[in-house]
Amino acid sequence: MERIALEPVNGLFLKAVEIYSRRRYGVVLDPFLAMAHNKKAVRANTLFEMRIDKLDTLDKTLRALAVMAPAALLGCSWCVDFGYWVSHNDGVDPAKLRTLPT
């Protein structure tokens, strides 16, 4: 059972975050619902994610490995699955992602 309720919190800011999440990923992600209880955390995470998306100087494969390696070392299965999904949609060869340490 989760520690933080994933019940949506009402508010205009949360509606904007839900719209962003649905446009970007197709659904509202659970981490957004968990962070929705703290507007500053949602704002910081969303702005950070938007800034990271603008960085295009790295090769897509190297970027995917840099994102997924810490998740694999930490053992966060959700992070690894989500990172794999995002990198697969970006066109990264899945065979290269299988070389991550487990």
Image (cartoon, rainbow, N blue to C red):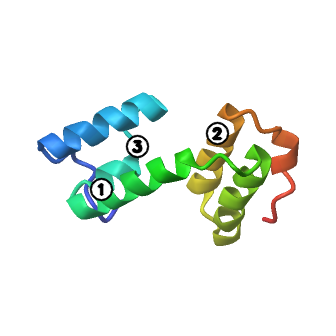
Residue type highlighted by circle 1: Arg
**Residue that numbered label 3 is attached to:** 29
Element carrying mark 2: helix
- Going from N to C along the chain, the mark reached first, 2 or 3, is 3
**Quick check: marks 1 and 3 in contact, CB under 8 Å?**
no
Instruction: Give how far across and how far down residue 55 sits, in percent.
Output: 60, 50
Q: Is residue 82 visible?
A: yes
Q: What residue do we see at 40% from left, 43% from top?
A: 29
Of callouts 1 and 3, the N-terminal one: 3
Specify the amino acid type for callout 2. Answer: Trp
Quadrant in the rendering for residue 70 = bottom right
Q: Distance from label 2 to label 1 (Cα)? A: 24 Å
Mark linked to residue 76: none
Quarter-wise, where is residue 60 in the image?
A: top right
Classify mark 3: residues with Cα within 10 Å, few (<14), some (14-19) or many (20+): few
Q: Residue at x 60, y 62 (%)?
A: 76
Give the quarter of the figure containing the C terminus.
bottom right
Could you tell me which residue is drawn at 30 percent across and 49 percent down?
33
Q: CA distance from mark 2 to mark 3?
A: 13 Å
Q: Which residue is mark 1?
A: 43
Rendered location of residue 59, percent (x, y): 77, 47
The answer, for residue 38, to whether it is visible in the render is no
Q: Which residue is mark 2?
A: 85
- Mark 1 surroundings: few (<14), some (14-19) or many (≥20) residues within 10 A: some
Q: Marks 1 and 3, how far apart in space?
A: 15 Å
Look at the numbered disc 3 and give the secondary structure of its residue: loop
Q: Earlier in the sequence, mark 2 or mark 1?
A: 1
Give the quarter of the image for residue 73: bottom right
